[in-house]
Image (tube, rainbow, N blue to C red):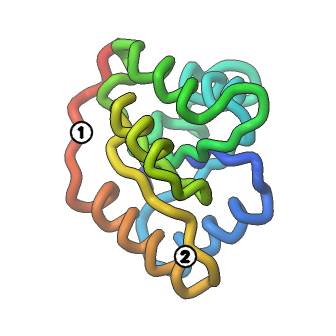
Amino acid sequence: MNKVMLLVDDDDSLSKFIKICVEESGALMEVKQVTSVDKAMDYLQNKGEFADKSRNPDPYVMLLDLGLPKTSGIDFLKRLKNKKEYAGMPVVILTAMESTENIRNAYCNYANSCLIKPFGFEKTKELMKSVTTYWGRYNRLPDRAD
């Protein structure tokens, strides 16, 4: 079974674009998208539409946008990393907001990486190939603490 990348981003068109880039990069990683912090928590806790764990396995890595509706990506990251069962899950910030403050804030709240959303298919494909190669092929995670 492919590893799962959970993409938390409210931009459906960009998310579809990222899914295509991951597929075309040849990565053995499946992208699952949710559009809000609430949906991300439902996915992680296998609640509601994500109740079937066989169809919605634990993500190997999360790509998190900072500019989400209702709750910011940073606030979600803080909440997530303060829960024992999610503290070890890699979270990669993927944002268009290229400010030193946002990047510092993300790392201070235990983001594992901060990436700026590239423009154009080839650059996005190249970035997604790098992300999936590193996090999906070479990185090793501990078992999730429940």
Tell whether label 1 touches label 2 (CB within 8 Å): no
Can residue 50 be seen here? The reply is no
In this rendered view, identify the residue nearer to me: 101 or 64.
101
| Residue at x 41% of width, y 73% of height | 129
Pointer 2: residues within 10 angstroms few (<14), some, or many (20+)?
some
Q: Residue at x 55, y 76 (%)?
A: 124
Label 1: state its secondary structure. Answer: loop
Residue 74 lies left or right of residue 1; in this view the side is right
Residue 54 showing in the rendered view: yes
The correct choice, above or below, for 35 with respect to 95 in the image is above
Q: Secondary structure at mark 2?
A: helix
Residue 99 lies, in percent from the top left, at 51, 53
Q: Name the residue carrying label 2.
A: 124
Q: Position of residue 110 (x, y in %)?
A: 34, 32
In the image, residue 113 above or below residue 45 = below
Q: Disc 1 designates what residue?
A: 141
Q: Is residue 101 left or right of residue 122?
A: left
Residue type at mark 1 is Leu
How far apart in space, not on screen, are marks 2 and 1 (Cα)? 25 Å
Image quarter for residue 126?
A: bottom left
Q: Which mark is residue 22?
A: none
* Name of the residue lying farthest toward the front: 100
Q: Horizontally, is 93 left or right of 88 in the view?
A: right
Give the class, few, some or many, for how many residues have Cα within 10 Å of label 1's Cα (few <14, many ≥20). few
Please name the residue shown 56% across and 19% down the image: 45
Image height of 82 relative to 142, above or below: above
Q: Is residue 129 left or right of residue 23?
A: left
Residue 36 pos. (x, y %): 72, 34
- Residue type pointed to by label 2: Thr
Q: Earlier in the sequence, mark 2 or mark 1?
A: 2
| Residue 127 percent location from the top left of the image | 45, 73
The residue lying toward the viewer, choosing from 48 and 6, is: 6
